[in-house]
Image (cartoon, rainbow, N blue to C red):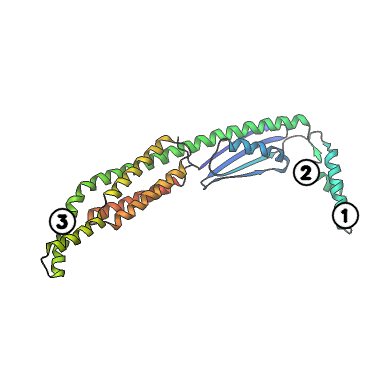
Amino acid sequence: MIQSMTGYAAASADSPRGRLSLELRSVNARFLDLQLRVAEELRPLEPRLRDLILARVARGKIDCRLFLNDKDIPQRPQRLNPQAIERLKGLAAEAQKTFPDAAPLRVADVLRWPGVVAEPEADEEKLRAIAERLCQTALDELVAARAREGAKLAASIGERLAAMRRRLEEVAPLLPQSLAAYQARLAERLREALGTADDDRVRAELAVFAAKVDVDEELERLRAHLTEAARTLERGGAVGKRLDFIAQELNREANTLASKAASQQVSDCALELKLLVEQIREQVQNIE
């Protein structure tokens, strides 16, 4: 299955601390780039969220946002965390030595320090379980969205690969005839330029020319790259980088074909191939 790197998903649920909401946004990127934006009071959940996302997504820029709406939740009994307070006291004492003129900590400063006000243990476990379920639900939705988009991209790329193959098969039978006609015109010009009817000299010049404009090898490589691209699409998975490499090779061969074109038909074919390759490369940039 081909997956796009673009998608969006969201999920929310009630928790002991309020309405917990999670959003996932995904766009294309060269590698996997995960950014988590987690409210300060939910910071302990961040490592688990990271593990869940990394297990399901291989590539793309992922923005995960987890936040809590506790406006409608009545105040819950809270307690101070002695360990956090002791750590804060130690840090305050060290800071006072360095800055002896600094004002001492106020009670409001202490209460705002992360971890000083401890939540009930039961709330912590329930919140963690809810956050994990929300993340899994959002990931299911995100992966499904990326798969739907990926299927459209794969179909679009497949159509262009088929168009390239059809164009190659149309132009291939015309090559011998067009090459012979061009060689005939070139032979006449050589005889006029050389002022001689020396057929051996003319044949030698034509042989050099024929070697320079021979495109059989380019056509075979183009066919091979098209076959490999189709096989990669059919295999699916995280194939974006491989398809991008194949598209580069297709573009290289199309450029060579254009530079060797001995007739208008070959030149037109090369230009059409380059256009189709560019369209493929634009689509491939969004594939995982």
Front-most of residues 259 and 19: 259
Q: Looking at the figure, which quarter contains the N terminus?
A: top left
Residue drawn at (88%, 54%) of the image: 96
**Image x and y of residue 212, in percent:** 26, 57
**Residue type at tag 2:** Pro
Residue corresponding to mark 1: 96
Secondary structure at numbered mark 3: helix
Front-most of residues 147 and 244: 244
**Image x and y of residue 16, in percent:** 72, 31
Residue corresponding to mark 2: 114
Mark 2 vs mark 3, CA separation in Å: 83 Å
Secondary structure at numbered mark 2: loop
Mark 3 vs mark 1, CA separation in Å: 93 Å
Asked where in the image residue 56 lies, by quadrant, the reply is top right
* Mark with earlier residue (2, 3): 2
Crowding around mark 2 (Cα neighbors within 10 Å: few <14, some 14 to 19, many 20+) is: few
**Residue type at tag 3:** Ala
User: Seen in the image, is 24 located left or right of residue 277?
Assistant: right
